[in-house]
Image (cartoon, grey):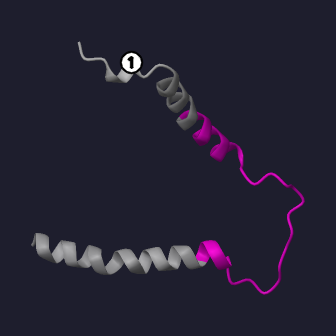
């Protein structure tokens, strides 16, 4: 059973990866190219996620004893 699930995962992973990379590098299959008026690439949701990830990273970088200290 586990072998079958692993085999399906091994087959589906490169398919998903290659389709994702194609979408990232070549974009969608639209006929015309449209330019956005804004030069800001990240929206409020992406900025919120980045801030939520950066605050603990900076905190751990400045005070690593918080996570490495054993009581």
Magenta extent: 23-52
Q: Position of residue 26 (x, y in %)?
A: 66, 79
| Quadrant in the picture for the C terminus | top left
Q: Relative to 61, is 4 above or below?
A: below
In the displayed orientation, state which residue is furthest to the bottom. 31
Secondary structure under tag 1 reads helix
In the displayed orientation, state which residue is furthest to the top. 71
Q: Relative to 63, is 56 above or below?
A: below
Q: Position of residue 31 (x, y in %)?
A: 78, 87
Q: Which residue is mark 1?
A: 65
Hey, which quadrant is residue 28 in on the image? bottom right
Say which residue appears at 80% left-offset and 51% top-offset. 40
40 in the magenta segment: yes
Say which residue appears at 28% left-offset and 76% top-offset. 10
Local crowd at mark 1 within 10 Å, few (<14), some, or many (≥20)?
A: few
37 in the magenta segment: yes
């Amino acid at each position: 059973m586990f072998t079958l699930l692993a085999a399906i995962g091994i087959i589906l992973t490169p398919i998903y990866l290659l389709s994702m990379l194609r979408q990232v590098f070549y974009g969608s299959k639209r006929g015309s190219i449209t330019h956005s008026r804004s030069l800001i690439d990240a929206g409020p949701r992406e900025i919120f996620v980045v801030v939520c990830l950066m605050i603990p990273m900076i905190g751990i970088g400045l005070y690593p004893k918080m996570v490495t200290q054993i009581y």
